[in-house]
């Protein structure tokens, strides 16, 4: 491997490690942060390429923001970049969640994160809004794609399933082209698996291989397997696991890390994490061979346009719901507005906005 290739792999590793530490807020926030870092600040990909990769990840099961990270790593440093980007994005969250799981098992609770999130989430909302405004010009290429996006946003806010929205928009967009085409701590509990770590691994591998949709869908899969079928978790433990996955940075699928630790300690945490993310590496590795071909014909290109419009609408819908719960007073509103203004006027690293929000949140919790 040449020095240039090594340099690119190191760049990918450093960037996605950083994103894994600061990427609070779920998939919409992760996508916005990646767009800001890779398109706006570094110019590694264009907005057009970014939205195509974003749309392509919606065609396969698994954690979309992690799959987008894997795709972007491949764009920058090919095969090694694919693996390094995914591992570096997952690793910080997996370590943080393992530490919180240890505290949960030992003390029956987890360290409070409310103060941090009070300041961080409003800043994240501004980052998402800024990314949406930029991507809008790339995704909405016509009145038809604008109508599709508006309909998708309305359907999402009315509670329609995300997968159904994506599929409908893709098929409607493709249908318009059809005529033309026709032309480290030991566990402090008894391991309820009875040592059946293979069953834990296989169950998480299955979930990672077939799951489409949001954290609510993940919750349903986990409940069906770990609460109802296997009886390894209580309802409360499951809710606590999903909550930790939501409030920590990085992929929400690190919920599996928490569950693995609760079920079987450190070996369980490791195996559950590997199992739930492994299909994403395989799917994206296969998808990299197909993404360029999706633009090769009018029909598949239109299908991808439809997916992109729906994905952007879902991103907007999620950020709207997040804003309703996070912007609760003048201070959180001010954090959002000031962050948005700075994003518009400067090219500051978004880590500074996350750090500033965290400091404001901690000060607010301690003194107000």
Image: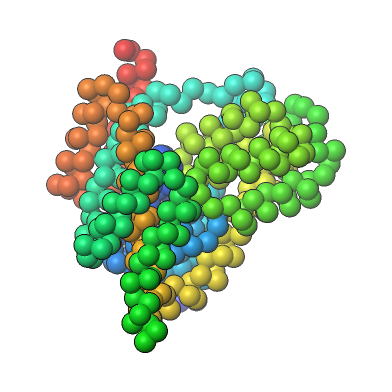
State the image quarter where residue 127 is shown.
top left
128, above or below 62, in the image: above
Tell me which residue sits at (76%, 39%) in the image.
229
Residue 208 at x, y = what percent?
61, 53
Q: Is residue 216 left or right of residue 52?
A: right
Look at the image and tell me whether residue 73 can be seen: no
Q: Is residue 163 left or right of residue 41?
A: right
User: Which residue is situated farthest in the front direction here?
Assistant: 179
Q: Is residue 196 left or right of residue 78?
A: right
Nearer the observer, 168 or 13: 168
178, above or below 173, in the image: below
Tell me which residue sits at (48%, 71%) in the image.
288
Tell me which residue sits at (33%, 45%) in the image.
154
Nearer the observer, 215 or 194: 215
3, above or below 110, in the image: below
Q: Is residue 303 left or right of residue 271?
A: left
Query: What is the number of callouts on the image?
Result: 0
User: Which residue is situated farthest in the left direction here?
Assistant: 345
Residue 250 at x, y = what percent?
47, 44
User: Which residue is situated farthest in the top direction here?
Assistant: 368
């Amino acid at each position: 491997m040449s020095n240039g290739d090594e340099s690119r792999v190191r760049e990918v590793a450093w960037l996605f490690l950083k994103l894994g530490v600061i990427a609070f807020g779920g998939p919409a926030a992760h996508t916005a942060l990646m767009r800001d870092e890779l398109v706006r600040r570094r110019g590694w990909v264009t907005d057009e390429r970014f939205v195509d990769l974003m749309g392509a990840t919606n065609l396969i099961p698994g954690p979309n923001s992690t799959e987008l990270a894997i795709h972007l790593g491949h764009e920058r440093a090919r095969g090694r970049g694919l693996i390094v980007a995914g591992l570096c994005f997952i690793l910080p969250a997996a370590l943080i969640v393992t530490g919180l799981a240890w505290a949960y098992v030992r003390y029956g609770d987890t360290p409070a994160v409310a103060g941090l999130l009070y300041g961080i989430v409003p800043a994240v909302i501004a980052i998402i809004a800024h990314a949406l405004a930029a991507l809008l010009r790339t995704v909405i290429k016509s009145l038809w794609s604008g109508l599709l996006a508006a309909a998708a946003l309305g359907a999402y806010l009315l509670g329609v399933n995300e997968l159904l929205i994506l599929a409908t928009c893709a098929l409607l967009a493709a249908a318009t082209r059809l005529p033309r085409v026709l032309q480290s701590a030991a566990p402090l509990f008894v391991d309820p698996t009875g040592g059946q770590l293979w069953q834990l691994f296989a169950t998480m591998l299955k979930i990672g291989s077939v799951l489409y949709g949001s954290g609510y869908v993940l919750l349903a899969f986990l409940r069906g397997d770990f609460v109802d079928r296997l009886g390894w978790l209580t309802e409360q433990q499951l809710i606590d696991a999903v909550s930790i996955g939501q409030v920590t940075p990085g992929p929400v699928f690190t919920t599996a890390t928490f569950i693995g630790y609760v079920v079987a300690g450190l070996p369980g945490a490791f195996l559950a994490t590997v199992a739930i993310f492994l299909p994403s590496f395989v799917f994206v590795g296969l998808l990299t061979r197909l993404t360029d071909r999706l633009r090769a014909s009018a029909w598949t290109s239109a299908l991808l346009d439809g997916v992109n419009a729906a994905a952007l609408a879902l991103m907007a819908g999620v950020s709207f719901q997040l804003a309703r719960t996070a912007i609760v007073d003048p201070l959180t509103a001010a954090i959002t507005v000031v962050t948005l203004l700075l994003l518009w006027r400067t090219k500051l690293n978004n880590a500074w906005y996350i750090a500033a929000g965290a400091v404001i949140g901690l000060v607010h919790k301690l003194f107000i």
